[in-house]
Amino acid sequence: MVEDTVSRGQGLDAHLLLSRGEGFTLDVPISIAPGYTVALLGPNGAGKSTVVAALAGLLPLDDGHITLDGRTLDDPERDVLVPPEDRRVGVVFQEYVLFPHLTAAQNIEFGLRSSKVSRAAIHEQSVQWLDRFGLDGLADRKPRALSGGESQRVALARALITEPDLLLLDEPLAALDATTRVHLRRTLADHLDRFPGARLLITHDPTEALLLADEIHVIEDGTITQVGKPDDIRLRPRTSYIADLAGSNLIRGTADKGIVTAGSHRLHIADTHIAGSVLAAIHPRAIVIDRHRSDGSPRNTWETTVIRIEHYGDRVRLQTGDPILLTAEITPDALHALEIDEGSVVWISIKATEINVETD
Amino acid sequence: MTEALAPTRRRSRRPPLVLVVLAILGLAVFVIPLLGLLARTPWRDLPTLLAGDVVIDALRLSVITSLGATAISAVLGVPLAWMLARVEFPGRSIVRGLVLLPLVIPPVVGGAALLFALGRRGLIGEPLNRATGLVLPFSTWGAVIAVTFVAMPFLVITVEGALRNLDPRFEGAAATLGAGRWTVLRRVTFPMVGPSLVAGLVLTWARAFGEFGATITFAGNLEGRTQTLPLAVFIALESDRDTAVALSLIMVAISLTVLVVLRERWWKTP
């Protein structure tokens, strides 16, 4: 589906090739159809910010190309380089980069002032956008008087008001504290849904990528190491790095009095106060695998079947079947000692304290 | 434990005595000469002295040359600062050294150099004179140039520093929002370095207002044409002490007012 649309010349089609001193080379092919969100997931220093700069036009490519909705934005071979102001690429920068000398409303209007829109029309539009982003009371505030969440919304409105063809979000949630982040991840998802263009989310946070993106590109040391749907990345990580980064078990459910109900299954959790719709994360190493029922303290224990076994150097990942599909990580020695094969029946146990629960 | 801690904490709120004493001595270095000036001021004759032709002419010339130098510095110094801060070109550190040179060489040397360059027989002065008939030395324009030579570095270093400290992402963000290079300069770069620009202009003006050495060397000491307040003070010291004091007093008053009112107001907000 993604490729179909891109081949018709819609959305983003790019191959970014860049070398930046000290032997660092960026080699990132990326295609995004309009209406789709791709997450670029990787650690700091992997080249994520270079991708943003190249797509926004702040850094020219050494080789490769950038095409957006059929327009070539950068192609060194054909000597084409469109400056940032003519690209129609909106950016929500890391830490937002709101203009400190302008008010929230003036920040949002900035892009329209650069175009040939009349003052009255600009005002009308900015009132609409302030309202849409729940910022109507904050129009005259300077950025330093805005909270992290408010700044994020101003940055998003500022980027979207020019109706770009591609929206780049560079770590849009990183500047926020943990509680705000969970809440804003959801409002961000709503706003993204309403934006018709292609979206690229840059993040180092696997949860963010898994929840907000239609497709994830994992970037390590300047190159893409895996591309896939969030579930592919999570359940079938291709490198041990991705396994560590994104290979967590995420379970959606409803919490009440220390119990999360997911489908027909019930998980005991340590937090007895959390209630309502939640997201439970269990690290693969927190899952204990045994051939027999353990007589220890874990509250969560059940019998299941090993569906798949994958080796990553000094680690082994097991995927287990019903009632809850989980990925567990053990050592090759343990696999050998327990004599586990695909199809083996095993007992799983998870301590309630090993399940991280946050409001969904 | 608490008893032992309490007195220490209370005492540490007061600044250390040694620092206070030294700071007061430091301040005295600036204040005592001013007190000397005030003590010597002929308050009763002051209005008559200040209304004298020499004083009025000198004040007028000082205002013209200092504001002229500030205007030229703004027009030429800001682009120079921008180049130094934003464009990588070969020999940039040498250029920066050249810009700062007037801050450290004696103004007399600067004035002499200007004379060799722009004088009637100077490197540029001679062809300029032949082509246009313009004679810069010993003219008001010459005084403006001499003052600019000495004062402009203040503007360049202040604005360059501000431009370097400005996160380039702001300009990048403006560009992604459709702003061309001029729009970015007008709507983001200059407003954001505005406070430093004003501070730099005030410093430049203050330095220009007090300039002596380069002016007297290059432009001479012609009453009504190149004799600015500092030059008038220097001459008056030899002949008419009371006028010298009166001239000094208005210089101090004007400079201090401008520095306190303008500079303080803009210096704090980056």
Image: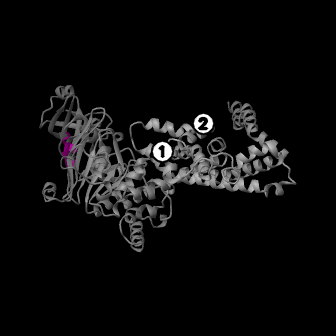
Occupied quadrant, residue B220? top right
The residue wearing badge 2 is: B109
Residue B227: x and y in percent read 69, 49
Quadrant including the C terminus of chain A: bottom left
Q: Is residue A350 shown left or right of residue A146?
A: left
Residue B195 in sight in this render? yes
Which sits in the foreground, A98 or A292?
Answer: A98
User: In the picture provided, is A99 more to the left or to the right than B233?
Assistant: left
The disc placed on residue B165 is: 1
Q: Is residue B183 left or right of residue B246?
A: left
Q: Does residue A256 sit above or below B100 in this rendering?
A: below
- Determine the image quadrant of residue A235: top left
The spot of residue A295 in percent (x, y) is 28, 33
Crowdedness of circle 2 by 10 Å Cα count: few (<14), some, many (20+)? some
Quadrant holding the N terminus of chain A: bottom left
Whether residue A267 can be seen here: no
User: Element under label 2?
Assistant: helix
Q: What is the distance, in whole Å, between disc 2 and disc 1 at their CAs? A: 33 Å
Residue segment shown in magenta: A226-237
Q: Secondary structure at mark 1?
A: helix
For the image shown, how many numbered marks are present on the structure? Answer: 2
x and y percent of residue B243 in the render?
80, 49
Tell which subunit mark 1 falls on: B
* Residue closer to the observer: A152 or B128: B128
Question: Looking at the image, is mark 2 or mark 1 earlier in the sequence?
Answer: 2
Mark 1 residue type:
Asn
The answer to if B27 sits in the magenta stretch is no
Residue type marked 2 = Val
Percent across and percent down for residue A226 are: 20, 42
